Image (cartoon, rainbow, N blue to C red):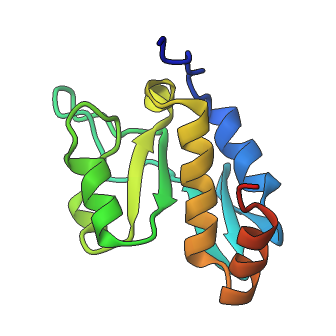
Amino acid sequence: MRKPATTPARVEDIHAAALAMPFVTVESAGQNPVYQVGGKSFVFFRNPRKDAFDPATGELYDDVIVIWVSDEADRVALVQDETRPFFTTPHFNGHPSVLIRATHVGQVAREEITELVQDAWLSRASRRRAKEWLTQHAPG
């Protein structure tokens, strides 16, 4: 049996998945959007910072996206798999999130990036909102 083909994710898929969640507001950090639920960020596009740079050139990455995760086990699983594009920096030690560069989003399937954004929203939404969303989207 053949495995179904997966569609590579695009940055637009991250925006669409975040905006599809209920009670989302969009703030900005300079030119970059910050997606929030109940005043809590769950996905944000970072401005260049000294902690994320190309080790060969020293050039700061200008395309880092931060996605919250539900717990440390999820974070570790995503960043320790060297075949995956997720990473972290010392600045984010102990923070429940993973980083991915926009230029590497296509290494992840659209379905997975959507699920990651949904899980990020669930990790930051109120219990009531999360429960309502999960009830409405339970497999059927």
Q: Is residue 82 left or right of residue 24?
A: left
Q: Position of residue 58 (x, y in %)?
A: 22, 35
Q: Nearer the viewer, residue 118 or 61?
A: 118
Q: Choose top left, top right, bottom left or bottom right for residue 27.
A: bottom right
Q: Quadrant of residue 126?
A: bottom right
Q: Position of residue 88 (x, y in %)?
A: 28, 54
Q: Residue at x 48, y 55 (%)?
A: 66
Q: Residue at x 71, y 69 (%)?
A: 134
Residue located at (19% from left, 48% from top): 80
Which part of the image, by quadrant, shows the C terminus? Answer: bottom right
The quarter holding residue 73 reads bottom left
Towards the viewer: 136 or 84 = 136
Position of 91 relative to 83 (above/below)? below
In the image, is residue 8 above or below residue 117? above
The residue lying toward the viewer, choosing from 135 and 115, is 135
Image label count: 0
Residue 16 shows up from this direction: yes
Residue 51 lies, in percent from the top left, at 27, 54
